[in-house]
Image (cartoon, grey):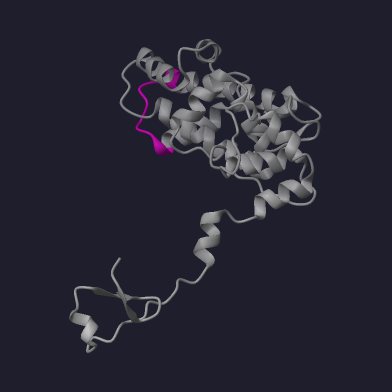
Amino acid sequence: MFFDYNQKLLSQIHPDLSISMETDFALQVYMSELVQTMFCGKHKTLDEIKLKMKKVLGDTEIYKHAVRQGEKAISKKGNNLGFTVPILKTVSHNCEKMESEDDLLFMAGVGDYYVSEILELAGNATKKKITMMNVEYAFRNDIELMHSYKYLKVNPFRDYIPEVTEKSSLFEIRFALGKKGLVKMEDDMTFETEFIQKYNTKEKLFVLMFTPSPIEKNQDKPKPKSLPCNPKSPKATSKEHECNPKTGRYIKKK
């Protein structure tokens, strides 16, 4: 995996910021899945690797820059690439053997660039520590990053729902409500103006979050017991009467 790598790279991009342990691990999982999706499999040439990359990243500027960084890594033989060793370990453990060292260096350059993009955008959304929500904010506010965000089957950021406490900000609480599907949240993490105006305090948002829905309320209510009617009653064989399970008595059919 990429232990300590994210923090070292972050110190070059945002020297005053740190990254939470939860976010660091989630980013490791995300990049491991991205690397395996783009580079694992039977590739004979570097061009075939680029084609698979294009499928995952889309025909975007990020894809084009990533290819350039990968090619630059080959020409420099991986010098100054912090991502090289972790990538080699991940690929050798999870993927089939690559055809050449150039393929591995290319992947290292791509990984270096991609993580840098995520950390730069996530760092722009905070002043102290990069959290899970900051990284998701980076994805959701960048159309090109969203391509891979939606493409990957395993995505810890997409499945993340923050834990809400009294110290949480209004935006964090609204974000949690959006992830739970209790309110409508757009791809760029924006909310309808009416919702923001109506629920403009933590107290109102907490009520909305912890009030059970009508479906949940009905599930909590005990179901009424059905009472059997007397089968020996003369009305049991009557075509004009039917059993009322609520009372256990026969009533006239309507």
| Magenta highlight on residue 182 | no
Residue in the picture at 55% in, 61% down: 217
Read off the magenta span: 93-103
Position of residue 218 measured from the top left corner of the image (x, y, whole percent): 51, 62
Q: Foreground residue, 177 or 16?
A: 177
Q: Foreground residue, 112 or 160?
A: 160
| Magenta highlight on residue 96 | yes
Q: Quadrant of residue 182?
A: top right
Q: Report whether residue 84 is seen.
A: yes
Residue in the picture at 60% in, 20% down: 142
Q: Dividing the image into 4 quarters, which one contains the C terminus?
A: bottom left
Residue in the picture at 30% in, 73% down: 252
Horizontal side of residue 212 vs 99, given as left or right:
right
Question: How many dots with numbers?
Answer: 0
Q: Foreground residue, 246 or 100?
A: 246
Position of residue 228 measured from the top left corner of the image (x, y, whole percent): 32, 82
Q: Quadrant of residue 153?
A: top left
Position of residue 21 measured from the top left corner of the image (x, y, whole percent): 67, 44
Horizontal side of residue 132 vs 128, given as left or right:
left
Residue in the picture at 59% in, 41% down: 179
Q: Report whether residue 1 is seen.
A: no
